[in-house]
Image (cartoon, rainbow, N blue to C red):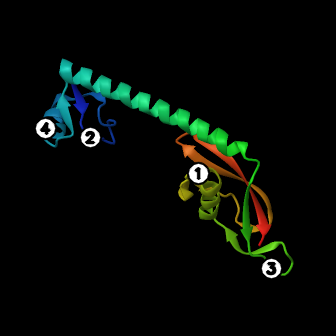
């Protein structure tokens, strides 16, 4: 087996900067000529370890910030959204979308949520209070409470 350090992500082997062992022919005939990897030397291994340590440090910092954001979002009792309603005063003319939730959160707290990371279990078509999950980081989810009021 030959030790190599990946320069780019390879789906079958790992992410860039990872030290892996592969068959000598695979490294010599495919990975190295394609620019996907370099042969591992002491200096390259040390550089890869430093890069991975730096990435772990950055990931830990981002996760800590995400936990703080989650705490801030969940500290609000609820966010209010006003929407036009029908004659009965309860049924909405449309639905409350993830973009509406992201907009109200951004206006009240200054925290920007990606609408694609907001999960609304069922369409919100009536007034009331709803609990909505929002992904703040890879494994950090915040529960945002939304109160839909008639406009």
- Sequence-wise, the earlier of marks 2 and 3 is 2
Q: Position of residue 19 (x, y in %)?
A: 29, 27
Disc nearest the viewer among 2 and 4: 2
Q: Quadrant of residue 102?
A: bottom right
Q: Mark 1 highlights which residue? A: 110
Q: CA distance from mark 2 to mark 4?
A: 16 Å
Q: Position of residue 27 (x, y in %)?
A: 18, 33
Q: CA distance from mark 2 to mark 3?
A: 56 Å
The answer to whether residue 56 of the structure is visible from this angle is yes
Cβ atoms under marks 1 and 4 closer than 8 Å: no
Cβ atoms under marks 2 and 4 closer than 8 Å: no
Q: CA distance from mark 1 to mark 3?
A: 31 Å
- 83 versus 117 height, above or below: below
Mark seen at residue 86: 3
Disc nearest the viewer among 2 and 3: 3
Mark seen at residue 8: 2
Q: What's the residue at 63%, 50% (across, down)?
A: 109
Apparent side of residue 24 relative to residue 76 in the rendered image (left or right): left
- 11 versus 79 height, above or below: above
- Sequence-wise, the earlier of marks 2 and 4 is 2
Q: CA distance from mark 3 to mark 4?
A: 69 Å
Q: Nearer the viewer, residue 15 or 113?
A: 113
Q: CA distance from mark 1 to mark 4?
A: 52 Å
Apparent side of residue 62 relative to residue 97 in the rendered image (left or right): left
Residue at far bottom of view: 87
Q: Mark 4 highlights which residue? A: 29
Q: Quadrant of residue 46?
A: top left
Q: Quadrant of residue 103?
A: bottom right
- Sequence-wise, the earlier of marks 3 and 4 is 4
Q: What's the residue at 58%, 47% (across, down)?
A: 135
């Amino acid at each position: 087996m030959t030790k190599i350090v990946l320069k780019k992500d390879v789906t079958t082997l790992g992410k860039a900067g990872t030290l892996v062992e592969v068959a000598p022919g695979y490294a010599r005939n495919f990975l190295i000529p394609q620019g996907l990897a370099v042969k591992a030397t002491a200096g390259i291994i040390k550089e890869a370890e430093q890069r991975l340590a730096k990435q772990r440090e950055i990931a830990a910092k981002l996760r800590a910030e995400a936990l703080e954001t989650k705490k801030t979002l969940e500290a609000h009792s609820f966010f209010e959204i006003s929407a036009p309603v029908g004659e009965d005063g309860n049924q909405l003319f449309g639905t409350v979308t993830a973009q509406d939730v992201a907009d109200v959160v951004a206006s009240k707290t200054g925290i920007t949520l990606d609408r694609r990371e907001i999960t609304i279990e069922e369409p919100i078509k009536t007034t009331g209070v709803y609990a909505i999950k929002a992904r703040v980081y890879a494994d950090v989810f915040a529960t945002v409470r939304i109160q839909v009021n008639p406009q």
